[in-house]
Image (cartoon, grey):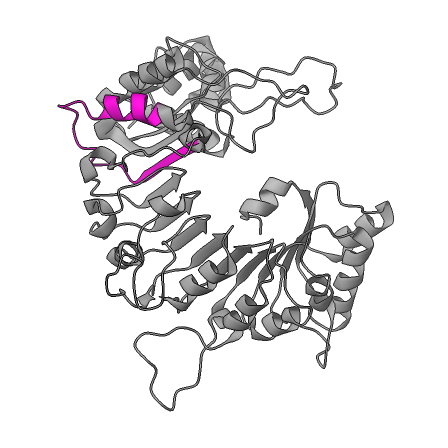
Protein backbone atom coordinates (compact mmCIF):
# COMPACT_ATOMS: atom_id res chain seq x y z
CA UNK A 1 0.00 0.00 0.00
CA UNK A 2 1.41 3.37 -0.97
CA UNK A 3 2.16 5.84 1.80
CA UNK A 4 -0.26 8.66 0.95
CA UNK A 5 1.05 11.33 3.29
CA UNK A 6 0.90 14.75 1.68
CA UNK A 7 3.86 15.75 -0.44
CA UNK A 8 4.87 19.41 -0.26
CA UNK A 9 3.53 21.19 -3.32
CA UNK A 10 5.61 23.63 -5.29
CA UNK A 11 6.77 24.38 -8.84
CA UNK A 12 6.96 20.67 -9.69
CA UNK A 13 3.16 20.58 -9.86
CA UNK A 14 3.27 22.81 -12.93
CA UNK A 15 3.92 19.50 -14.75
CA UNK A 16 0.57 17.86 -15.52
CA UNK A 17 1.60 14.33 -14.52
CA UNK A 18 2.67 15.56 -11.10
CA UNK A 19 -0.87 16.78 -10.45
CA UNK A 20 -2.09 13.19 -10.53
CA UNK A 21 -3.14 11.69 -7.20
CA UNK A 22 -0.22 9.98 -5.50
CA UNK A 23 -2.05 6.64 -5.62
CA UNK A 24 -2.46 6.87 -9.43
CA UNK A 25 1.16 7.86 -10.02
CA UNK A 26 2.23 4.97 -7.80
CA UNK A 27 0.05 2.61 -9.86
CA UNK A 28 1.66 3.87 -13.09
CA UNK A 29 5.09 3.21 -11.61
CA UNK A 30 4.05 -0.34 -10.73
CA UNK A 31 2.86 -1.03 -14.28
CA UNK A 32 6.20 0.21 -15.59
CA UNK A 33 8.13 -1.94 -13.14
CA UNK A 34 6.17 -5.06 -14.08
CA UNK A 35 6.81 -4.52 -17.81
CA UNK A 36 10.53 -3.93 -17.32
CA UNK A 37 13.15 -6.60 -17.98
CA UNK A 38 14.75 -8.22 -14.93
CA UNK A 39 17.28 -6.05 -13.11
CA UNK A 40 20.95 -6.40 -13.96
CA UNK A 41 20.20 -7.46 -17.49
CA UNK A 42 22.94 -6.88 -20.05
CA UNK A 43 22.84 -3.29 -21.37
CA UNK A 44 21.96 -2.79 -25.03
CA UNK A 45 22.82 0.14 -27.29
CA UNK A 46 20.09 2.65 -28.03
CA UNK A 47 18.61 2.73 -31.53
CA UNK A 48 21.02 4.37 -33.95
CA UNK A 49 23.98 4.23 -31.59
CA UNK A 50 27.31 3.06 -32.88
CA UNK A 51 28.45 -0.31 -31.52
CA UNK A 52 31.64 1.48 -30.43
CA UNK A 53 29.71 3.95 -28.28
CA UNK A 54 29.64 3.14 -24.57
CA UNK A 55 26.29 1.54 -23.65
CA UNK A 56 23.85 3.72 -21.73
CA UNK A 57 23.21 3.03 -18.07
CA UNK A 58 20.66 0.23 -17.78
CA UNK A 59 18.94 0.60 -14.45
CA UNK A 60 15.79 -1.06 -13.09
CA UNK A 61 12.67 0.96 -13.87
CA UNK A 62 11.92 1.81 -10.25
CA UNK A 63 15.41 3.26 -9.83
CA UNK A 64 15.07 5.37 -12.96
CA UNK A 65 11.77 6.95 -11.89
CA UNK A 66 13.12 7.58 -8.40
CA UNK A 67 15.85 9.77 -9.95
CA UNK A 68 13.58 11.97 -12.10
CA UNK A 69 12.63 14.52 -9.45
CA UNK A 70 12.01 14.88 -5.72
CA UNK A 71 8.27 14.23 -6.08
CA UNK A 72 8.71 11.06 -8.09
CA UNK A 73 11.40 9.81 -5.72
CA UNK A 74 9.14 10.41 -2.74
CA UNK A 75 6.29 8.51 -4.37
CA UNK A 76 8.53 5.64 -5.57
CA UNK A 77 10.16 5.12 -2.19
CA UNK A 78 6.73 5.20 -0.53
CA UNK A 79 5.48 2.38 -2.83
CA UNK A 80 6.68 -0.91 -1.30
CA UNK A 81 5.33 -2.97 -4.22
CA UNK A 82 8.08 -1.55 -6.47
CA UNK A 83 10.83 -3.15 -4.40
CA UNK A 84 9.70 -6.75 -3.87
CA UNK A 85 12.02 -8.46 -6.39
CA UNK A 86 15.42 -8.90 -4.75
CA UNK A 87 18.07 -10.12 -7.20
CA UNK A 88 21.71 -10.66 -6.27
CA UNK A 89 24.05 -11.71 -9.07
CA UNK A 90 27.64 -12.88 -9.13
CA UNK A 91 28.60 -9.43 -10.48
CA UNK A 92 27.78 -7.87 -7.09
CA UNK A 93 30.10 -7.71 -4.12
CA UNK A 94 29.64 -6.91 -0.40
CA UNK A 95 28.08 -5.08 1.33
CA UNK A 96 25.18 -5.71 -1.13
CA UNK A 97 23.66 -2.27 -0.59
CA UNK A 98 21.09 -2.68 -3.36
CA UNK A 99 19.63 -5.85 -1.84
CA UNK A 100 19.53 -4.23 1.59
CA UNK A 101 17.73 -1.19 0.15
CA UNK A 102 15.14 -3.37 -1.62
CA UNK A 103 14.50 -5.32 1.59
CA UNK A 104 13.94 -2.11 3.52
CA UNK A 105 11.77 -0.39 0.92
CA UNK A 106 9.52 -3.44 0.41
CA UNK A 107 8.53 -3.13 4.08
CA UNK A 108 6.37 -6.13 5.04
CA UNK A 109 5.26 -7.25 1.59
CA UNK A 110 6.06 -10.75 0.27
CA UNK A 111 9.31 -10.76 -1.70
CA UNK A 112 10.77 -12.75 -4.58
CA UNK A 113 14.43 -13.61 -4.00
CA UNK A 114 16.93 -14.76 -6.64
CA UNK A 115 20.64 -15.40 -6.19
CA UNK A 116 23.03 -16.29 -9.03
CA UNK A 117 26.54 -17.18 -7.92
CA UNK A 118 27.66 -18.06 -11.45
CA UNK A 119 26.57 -17.23 -15.02
CA UNK A 120 23.54 -19.19 -16.16
CA UNK A 121 24.06 -21.65 -19.05
CA UNK A 122 22.48 -19.26 -21.57
CA UNK A 123 24.25 -16.13 -20.25
CA UNK A 124 26.50 -14.22 -22.66
CA UNK A 125 30.18 -13.86 -21.87
CA UNK A 126 32.83 -11.49 -23.09
CA UNK A 127 34.36 -12.03 -26.52
CA UNK A 128 37.32 -13.91 -25.04
CA UNK A 129 34.97 -16.13 -23.02
CA UNK A 130 35.84 -14.48 -19.76
CA UNK A 131 33.61 -12.61 -17.37
CA UNK A 132 33.20 -11.77 -13.70
CA UNK A 133 34.33 -14.48 -11.33
CA UNK A 134 31.64 -16.58 -9.62
CA UNK A 135 30.50 -15.46 -6.19
CA UNK A 136 32.74 -16.76 -3.41
CA UNK A 137 31.53 -18.89 -0.51
CA UNK A 138 32.03 -15.98 1.88
CA UNK A 139 29.96 -13.63 -0.29
CA UNK A 140 27.16 -16.18 -0.68
CA UNK A 141 27.08 -16.72 3.07
CA UNK A 142 26.85 -12.95 3.56
CA UNK A 143 23.96 -12.66 1.09
CA UNK A 144 22.03 -15.47 2.75
CA UNK A 145 22.63 -13.96 6.18
CA UNK A 146 21.21 -10.67 4.88
CA UNK A 147 18.11 -12.40 3.49
CA UNK A 148 17.46 -14.97 6.23
CA UNK A 149 15.77 -12.57 8.71
CA UNK A 150 13.14 -11.93 6.02
CA UNK A 151 12.43 -15.61 5.35
CA UNK A 152 8.82 -15.32 6.53
CA UNK A 153 8.25 -12.88 3.65
CA UNK A 154 9.78 -15.05 0.92
CA UNK A 155 7.21 -15.76 -1.79
CA UNK A 156 9.77 -17.15 -4.25
CA UNK A 157 13.35 -18.29 -3.66
CA UNK A 158 15.71 -19.07 -6.53
CA UNK A 159 19.31 -20.12 -6.00
CA UNK A 160 21.81 -20.91 -8.76
CA UNK A 161 25.15 -22.03 -7.31
CA UNK A 162 28.45 -22.71 -9.03
CA UNK A 163 28.99 -26.10 -7.37
CA UNK A 164 27.42 -28.53 -4.96
CA UNK A 165 29.90 -27.51 -2.30
CA UNK A 166 28.13 -24.13 -1.96
CA UNK A 167 24.87 -25.84 -1.04
CA UNK A 168 26.59 -27.84 1.68
CA UNK A 169 28.70 -25.09 3.21
CA UNK A 170 26.60 -21.94 2.63
CA UNK A 171 22.93 -22.57 1.88
CA UNK A 172 22.13 -25.32 4.37
CA UNK A 173 23.99 -23.96 7.44
CA UNK A 174 22.55 -20.44 7.19
CA UNK A 175 18.99 -21.57 6.65
CA UNK A 176 19.00 -24.32 9.27
CA UNK A 177 19.96 -22.10 12.19
CA UNK A 178 17.15 -21.87 14.72
CA UNK A 179 15.06 -19.93 15.44
CA UNK A 180 14.43 -19.03 11.76
CA UNK A 181 10.68 -19.13 11.12
CA UNK A 182 9.02 -21.42 8.61
CA UNK A 183 8.75 -19.77 5.16
CA UNK A 184 4.96 -19.94 5.29
CA UNK A 185 4.50 -17.75 2.20
CA UNK A 186 6.98 -19.58 -0.03
CA UNK A 187 5.29 -20.70 -3.26
CA UNK A 188 8.21 -21.07 -5.69
CA UNK A 189 11.49 -22.88 -4.94
CA UNK A 190 14.27 -23.19 -7.52
CA UNK A 191 17.63 -24.73 -6.58
CA UNK A 192 20.15 -25.32 -9.36
CA UNK A 193 23.76 -26.51 -9.38
CA UNK A 194 25.86 -25.50 -12.40
CA UNK A 195 28.46 -28.26 -11.90
CA UNK A 196 26.93 -31.12 -9.97
CA UNK A 197 29.15 -32.48 -7.18
CA UNK A 198 32.12 -30.48 -8.49
CA UNK A 199 32.53 -32.94 -11.36
CA UNK A 200 33.28 -35.79 -8.93
CA UNK A 201 30.95 -38.70 -8.29
CA UNK A 202 30.78 -38.06 -4.56
CA UNK A 203 27.90 -38.92 -2.27
CA UNK A 204 26.05 -36.12 -0.55
CA UNK A 205 23.09 -36.60 1.79
CA UNK A 206 19.79 -35.75 0.10
CA UNK A 207 18.46 -32.34 1.04
CA UNK A 208 15.33 -31.68 3.05
CA UNK A 209 14.39 -28.08 2.32
CA UNK A 210 13.38 -25.83 5.21
CA UNK A 211 12.73 -28.74 7.54
CA UNK A 212 10.29 -30.29 5.08
CA UNK A 213 7.56 -27.75 5.97
CA UNK A 214 6.42 -25.66 3.00
CA UNK A 215 2.65 -25.38 3.31
CA UNK A 216 2.05 -23.16 0.26
CA UNK A 217 4.57 -24.56 -2.23
CA UNK A 218 3.26 -24.40 -5.82
CA UNK A 219 6.32 -24.71 -8.08
CA UNK A 220 9.48 -26.75 -7.43
CA UNK A 221 12.59 -26.91 -9.62
CA UNK A 222 15.60 -29.07 -8.73
CA UNK A 223 18.57 -29.04 -11.11
CA UNK A 224 21.49 -31.27 -10.21
CA UNK A 225 20.40 -31.40 -6.56
CA UNK A 226 20.06 -34.58 -4.48
CA UNK A 227 16.57 -34.34 -2.97
CA UNK A 228 14.96 -36.16 -0.08
CA UNK A 229 11.94 -37.35 -2.06
CA UNK A 230 9.86 -38.27 0.99
CA UNK A 231 9.67 -34.84 2.65
CA UNK A 232 6.18 -33.86 3.70
CA UNK A 233 5.48 -30.99 1.32
CA UNK A 234 6.38 -33.18 -1.68
CA UNK A 235 4.32 -36.25 -0.86
CA UNK A 236 1.46 -34.71 1.09
CA UNK A 237 1.36 -30.97 0.49
CA UNK A 238 -1.54 -31.04 -1.98
CA UNK A 239 -0.50 -27.62 -3.35
CA UNK A 240 2.16 -28.32 -6.00
CA UNK A 241 1.22 -27.17 -9.51
CA UNK A 242 4.60 -27.38 -11.27
CA UNK A 243 7.45 -29.91 -10.93
CA UNK A 244 10.73 -29.44 -12.80
CA UNK A 245 13.42 -32.13 -12.39
CA UNK A 246 16.71 -31.86 -14.28
CA UNK A 247 20.07 -33.63 -14.22
CA UNK A 248 19.85 -36.23 -11.48
CA UNK A 249 22.22 -39.18 -11.26
CA UNK A 250 20.56 -42.58 -11.49
CA UNK A 251 21.20 -43.44 -7.84
CA UNK A 252 19.74 -40.15 -6.59
CA UNK A 253 16.48 -40.34 -8.53
CA UNK A 254 13.23 -41.31 -6.77
CA UNK A 255 11.87 -44.81 -6.97
CA UNK A 256 8.74 -45.20 -9.05
CA UNK A 257 6.60 -45.40 -5.91
CA UNK A 258 8.11 -42.20 -4.49
CA UNK A 259 7.70 -40.42 -7.84
CA UNK A 260 4.11 -41.61 -8.10
CA UNK A 261 3.30 -40.40 -4.59
CA UNK A 262 4.63 -36.93 -5.44
CA UNK A 263 2.53 -36.71 -8.59
CA UNK A 264 -0.57 -38.08 -6.87
CA UNK A 265 -0.37 -35.76 -3.87
CA UNK A 266 -1.12 -32.52 -5.74
CA UNK A 267 -3.06 -31.30 -8.78
CA UNK A 268 0.09 -31.01 -10.90
CA UNK A 269 -0.39 -28.91 -14.06
CA UNK A 270 3.18 -28.81 -15.41
CA UNK A 271 5.75 -31.63 -15.40
CA UNK A 272 9.24 -31.18 -16.83
CA UNK A 273 11.76 -34.03 -16.74
CA UNK A 274 15.24 -33.76 -18.30
CA UNK A 275 17.80 -36.46 -17.53
CA UNK A 276 15.86 -37.24 -14.37
CA UNK A 277 12.59 -38.83 -13.32
CA UNK A 278 12.01 -42.14 -11.57
CA UNK A 279 14.64 -44.86 -11.43
CA UNK A 280 14.31 -47.40 -14.17
CA UNK A 281 12.60 -50.56 -12.98
CA UNK A 282 11.06 -53.75 -14.25
CA UNK A 283 7.32 -53.66 -14.92
CA UNK A 284 5.45 -54.51 -11.74
CA UNK A 285 8.07 -53.21 -9.29
CA UNK A 286 9.32 -49.78 -8.29
CA UNK A 287 13.00 -50.66 -8.61
CA UNK A 288 13.45 -51.33 -4.89
CA UNK A 289 11.62 -54.63 -4.74
CA UNK A 290 8.33 -53.05 -3.65
CA UNK A 291 5.02 -53.63 -5.33
CA UNK A 292 4.51 -51.11 -8.10
CA UNK A 293 2.34 -48.06 -7.45
CA UNK A 294 0.75 -48.76 -10.84
CA UNK A 295 -0.67 -46.19 -13.23
CA UNK A 296 -0.90 -42.60 -12.01
CA UNK A 297 -3.77 -40.49 -13.26
CA UNK A 298 -2.98 -36.78 -13.68
CA UNK A 299 -6.31 -35.15 -14.53
CA UNK A 300 -4.92 -31.62 -14.09
CA UNK A 301 -1.73 -32.03 -16.14
CA UNK A 302 -1.68 -29.53 -19.03
CA UNK A 303 2.03 -29.22 -19.89
CA UNK A 304 4.65 -31.96 -20.13
CA UNK A 305 8.30 -31.74 -21.27
CA UNK A 306 10.56 -34.75 -21.61
CA UNK A 307 14.22 -34.56 -22.63
CA UNK A 308 17.57 -36.31 -22.46
CA UNK A 309 15.92 -39.65 -21.74
CA UNK A 310 16.49 -43.02 -23.35
CA UNK A 311 13.76 -44.68 -25.38
CA UNK A 312 13.11 -47.20 -22.60
CA UNK A 313 12.77 -44.51 -19.95
CA UNK A 314 10.44 -42.25 -21.88
CA UNK A 315 8.16 -45.05 -23.11
CA UNK A 316 8.12 -46.62 -19.65
CA UNK A 317 7.19 -43.30 -18.04
CA UNK A 318 4.42 -42.53 -20.52
CA UNK A 319 2.97 -46.03 -20.14
CA UNK A 320 2.39 -45.31 -16.43
CA UNK A 321 0.89 -41.83 -16.71
CA UNK A 322 -2.72 -41.13 -17.64
CA UNK A 323 -2.95 -37.55 -18.94
CA UNK A 324 -6.49 -36.93 -20.22
CA UNK A 325 -6.18 -33.11 -20.20
CA UNK A 326 -2.73 -32.68 -21.75
CA UNK A 327 -2.53 -29.52 -23.90
CA UNK A 328 1.21 -29.02 -24.49
CA UNK A 329 3.92 -31.61 -25.17
CA UNK A 330 7.63 -30.97 -25.74
CA UNK A 331 10.03 -33.75 -26.69
CA UNK A 332 13.78 -33.07 -26.71
CA UNK A 333 15.14 -36.49 -27.57
CA UNK A 334 18.11 -37.47 -29.73
CA UNK A 335 21.00 -39.92 -30.12
CA UNK A 336 18.55 -42.81 -30.49
CA UNK A 337 15.77 -43.99 -32.80
CA UNK A 338 12.42 -43.03 -31.24
CA UNK A 339 10.13 -44.63 -33.80
CA UNK A 340 8.64 -46.86 -31.09
CA UNK A 341 7.79 -43.76 -29.05
CA UNK A 342 5.82 -42.30 -31.96
CA UNK A 343 3.87 -45.53 -32.29
CA UNK A 344 3.13 -45.39 -28.56
CA UNK A 345 1.91 -41.78 -28.77
CA UNK A 346 -0.57 -42.50 -31.57
CA UNK A 347 -1.91 -45.62 -29.85
CA UNK A 348 -4.86 -45.51 -27.42
CA UNK A 349 -3.79 -43.58 -24.36
CA UNK A 350 -3.21 -44.94 -20.88
CA UNK A 351 -6.48 -44.71 -18.96
CA UNK A 352 -7.53 -45.21 -15.37
CA UNK A 353 -9.91 -46.76 -14.56
CA UNK A 354 -10.20 -49.08 -17.59
CA UNK A 355 -12.71 -47.77 -20.17
CA UNK A 356 -16.09 -49.44 -20.63
CA UNK A 357 -15.94 -52.35 -23.10
CA UNK A 358 -17.80 -50.51 -25.89
CA UNK A 359 -16.13 -47.12 -25.50
CA UNK A 360 -14.00 -45.72 -28.31
CA UNK A 361 -10.22 -45.72 -27.80
CA UNK A 362 -8.70 -42.32 -27.07
CA UNK A 363 -5.38 -40.98 -28.28
CA UNK A 364 -3.39 -38.70 -25.96
CA UNK A 365 -2.58 -36.44 -28.94
CA UNK A 366 -6.20 -35.56 -29.68
CA UNK A 367 -6.35 -32.85 -27.02
CA UNK A 368 -2.90 -31.33 -27.76
CA UNK A 369 -2.84 -27.66 -28.72
CA UNK A 370 0.94 -27.11 -28.63
CA UNK A 371 3.66 -29.53 -29.79
CA UNK A 372 7.45 -28.99 -29.77
CA UNK A 373 9.82 -31.47 -31.40
CA UNK A 374 13.57 -31.08 -30.94
CA UNK A 375 15.71 -33.31 -33.14
CA UNK A 376 13.46 -36.36 -32.77
CA UNK A 377 15.08 -39.21 -34.71
CA UNK A 378 12.53 -41.62 -36.16
CA UNK A 379 11.42 -43.29 -39.40
CA UNK A 380 10.13 -41.12 -42.24
CA UNK A 381 6.54 -42.33 -41.85
CA UNK A 382 6.33 -41.03 -38.27
CA UNK A 383 5.42 -37.46 -39.27
CA UNK A 384 2.24 -38.64 -40.98
CA UNK A 385 1.39 -40.89 -38.02
CA UNK A 386 1.68 -38.02 -35.56
CA UNK A 387 -0.06 -35.39 -37.67
CA UNK A 388 -3.11 -37.59 -38.28
CA UNK A 389 -3.82 -37.56 -34.55
CA UNK A 390 -3.27 -33.84 -33.88
CA UNK A 391 -6.93 -32.89 -34.13
CA UNK A 392 -6.80 -29.76 -31.94
CA UNK A 393 -3.27 -28.49 -32.59
CA UNK A 394 -2.81 -24.72 -32.73
CA UNK A 395 0.96 -24.27 -32.38
CA UNK A 396 3.91 -26.39 -33.57
CA UNK A 397 7.62 -25.78 -32.96
CA UNK A 398 10.12 -27.72 -35.09
CA UNK A 399 13.86 -27.73 -34.31
CA UNK A 400 15.05 -29.57 -37.37
CA UNK A 401 18.56 -30.92 -36.64
CA UNK A 402 18.03 -34.67 -36.80
CA UNK A 403 14.28 -34.18 -37.27
CA UNK A 404 13.22 -35.43 -40.69
CA UNK A 405 12.33 -32.74 -43.26
CA UNK A 406 8.95 -34.42 -43.76
CA UNK A 407 7.82 -32.99 -40.40
CA UNK A 408 8.03 -29.54 -41.97
CA UNK A 409 6.88 -30.43 -45.48
CA UNK A 410 3.69 -32.11 -44.27
CA UNK A 411 2.61 -28.88 -42.55
CA UNK A 412 1.86 -27.71 -46.08
CA UNK A 413 0.49 -30.80 -47.76
CA UNK A 414 0.71 -34.54 -47.93
CA UNK A 415 -0.89 -37.87 -48.58
CA UNK A 416 -4.52 -38.09 -49.45
CA UNK A 417 -5.33 -34.79 -47.72
CA UNK A 418 -5.01 -31.40 -49.32
CA UNK A 419 -3.77 -29.99 -46.00
CA UNK A 420 -2.67 -31.55 -42.76
CA UNK A 421 -3.27 -29.97 -39.38
CA UNK A 422 -6.29 -27.84 -40.36
CA UNK A 423 -6.47 -26.20 -36.90
CA UNK A 424 -2.83 -25.05 -36.94
CA UNK A 425 -2.38 -21.28 -36.51
CA UNK A 426 1.25 -20.73 -35.41
CA UNK A 427 4.43 -22.31 -36.77
CA UNK A 428 7.86 -21.83 -35.13
CA UNK A 429 11.02 -23.23 -36.71
CA UNK A 430 14.80 -23.45 -36.65
CA UNK A 431 16.79 -24.84 -39.57
CA UNK A 432 14.29 -23.77 -42.25
CA UNK A 433 14.95 -21.26 -45.06
CA UNK A 434 12.68 -18.40 -46.05
CA UNK A 435 11.98 -19.98 -49.43
CA UNK A 436 10.80 -23.20 -47.80
CA UNK A 437 8.63 -21.31 -45.33
CA UNK A 438 7.05 -19.21 -48.06
CA UNK A 439 6.10 -22.33 -50.02
CA UNK A 440 4.37 -23.94 -47.02
CA UNK A 441 2.53 -20.75 -46.07
CA UNK A 442 1.33 -20.28 -49.67
CA UNK A 443 0.05 -23.86 -49.93
CA UNK A 444 -1.96 -23.58 -46.72
CA UNK A 445 -3.53 -20.31 -47.81
CA UNK A 446 -4.39 -21.76 -51.21
CA UNK A 447 -6.03 -24.76 -49.53
CA UNK A 448 -8.11 -22.61 -47.19
CA UNK A 449 -6.15 -23.22 -43.96
CA UNK A 450 -3.92 -20.13 -43.64
CA UNK A 451 -1.39 -19.72 -40.88
CA UNK A 452 -1.72 -16.63 -38.70
CA UNK A 453 1.83 -16.41 -37.29
CA UNK A 454 5.31 -17.66 -38.19
CA UNK A 455 8.44 -17.33 -36.06
CA UNK A 456 11.87 -18.21 -37.48
CA UNK A 457 15.16 -18.41 -35.64
CA UNK A 458 17.46 -15.39 -35.91
CA UNK A 459 20.09 -16.19 -38.52
CA UNK A 460 17.80 -18.25 -40.74
CA UNK A 461 18.54 -17.84 -44.47
CA UNK A 462 15.69 -15.62 -45.60
CA UNK A 463 15.89 -13.48 -48.75
CA UNK A 464 14.49 -9.97 -48.60
CA UNK A 465 11.72 -10.77 -51.10
CA UNK A 466 10.63 -13.83 -49.09
CA UNK A 467 10.59 -11.85 -45.85
CA UNK A 468 8.52 -9.11 -47.48
CA UNK A 469 6.06 -11.68 -48.83
CA UNK A 470 5.73 -13.44 -45.46
CA UNK A 471 5.13 -10.16 -43.62
CA UNK A 472 2.44 -9.28 -46.13
CA UNK A 473 0.66 -12.64 -45.97
CA UNK A 474 0.76 -13.32 -42.23
CA UNK A 475 -0.76 -11.47 -39.31
CA UNK A 476 2.54 -11.91 -37.48
CA UNK A 477 6.04 -12.72 -38.75
CA UNK A 478 9.15 -12.33 -36.61
CA UNK A 479 12.68 -13.58 -36.04
CA UNK A 480 13.29 -14.84 -32.52
CA UNK A 481 16.30 -16.12 -30.61
CA UNK A 482 17.10 -19.78 -30.10
CA UNK A 483 16.31 -19.27 -26.41
CA UNK A 484 12.82 -17.93 -27.18
CA UNK A 485 12.16 -20.90 -29.43
CA UNK A 486 13.41 -23.28 -26.74
CA UNK A 487 11.36 -21.94 -23.85
CA UNK A 488 8.23 -21.20 -25.88
CA UNK A 489 5.77 -18.56 -24.77
CA UNK A 490 5.65 -16.80 -28.14
CA UNK A 491 2.17 -16.81 -29.63
> In the image, what residue occupies the spot 52% across and 56% down?
330
Q: Nearer the viewer, residue 130 or 84?
A: 130
> In the image, what residue occupies the spot 79% across and 52% down?
434
* Left or right, residue 271 beside residue 55: left
Q: Quadrant of residue 474?
A: bottom right
* Left or right, residue 180 beside residue 483: left
Instruction: Let me know if residue 240 appears in the view.
Output: yes
Q: Name the residue furthest left.
A: 179
In this rendering, the answer to whether 263 lies above or below 30 is below
Rendered location of residue 299, percent (x, y)? 34, 65
> In the image, what residue occupies the spot 36% across and 64% down?
282
Residues rendered magenta in the picture: 166-193
Determine if the magenta segment contains residue 187: yes
Determine if the magenta segment contains residue 240: no
Q: Nearer the viewer, residue 199 or 453?
A: 199
Q: Nearer the viewer, residue 107 or 13?
A: 107
Q: Quadrant of residue 164?
A: top left
Rendered location of residue 141, percent (x, y)? 32, 17
Rendered location of residue 390, percent (x, y)? 56, 70
Instruction: Let me know if residue 85 appears in the view.
Output: no
Amino acid sequence: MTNTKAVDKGPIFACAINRLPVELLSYIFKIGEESDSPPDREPTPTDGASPQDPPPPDLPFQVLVSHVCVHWRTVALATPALWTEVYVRYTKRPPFDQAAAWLSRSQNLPIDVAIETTPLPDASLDVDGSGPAPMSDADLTAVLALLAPHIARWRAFELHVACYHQLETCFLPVLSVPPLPVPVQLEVLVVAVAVSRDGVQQHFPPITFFGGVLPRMKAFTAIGVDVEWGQDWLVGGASLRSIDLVNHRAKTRPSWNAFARILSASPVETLRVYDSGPQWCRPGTDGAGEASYGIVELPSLKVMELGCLSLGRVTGLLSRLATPSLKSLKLHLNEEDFTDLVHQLVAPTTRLPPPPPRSSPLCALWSLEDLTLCELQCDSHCAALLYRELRSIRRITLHMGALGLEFFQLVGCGGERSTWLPTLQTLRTSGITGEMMRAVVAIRRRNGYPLRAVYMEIGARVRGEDEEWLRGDLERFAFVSAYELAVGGIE
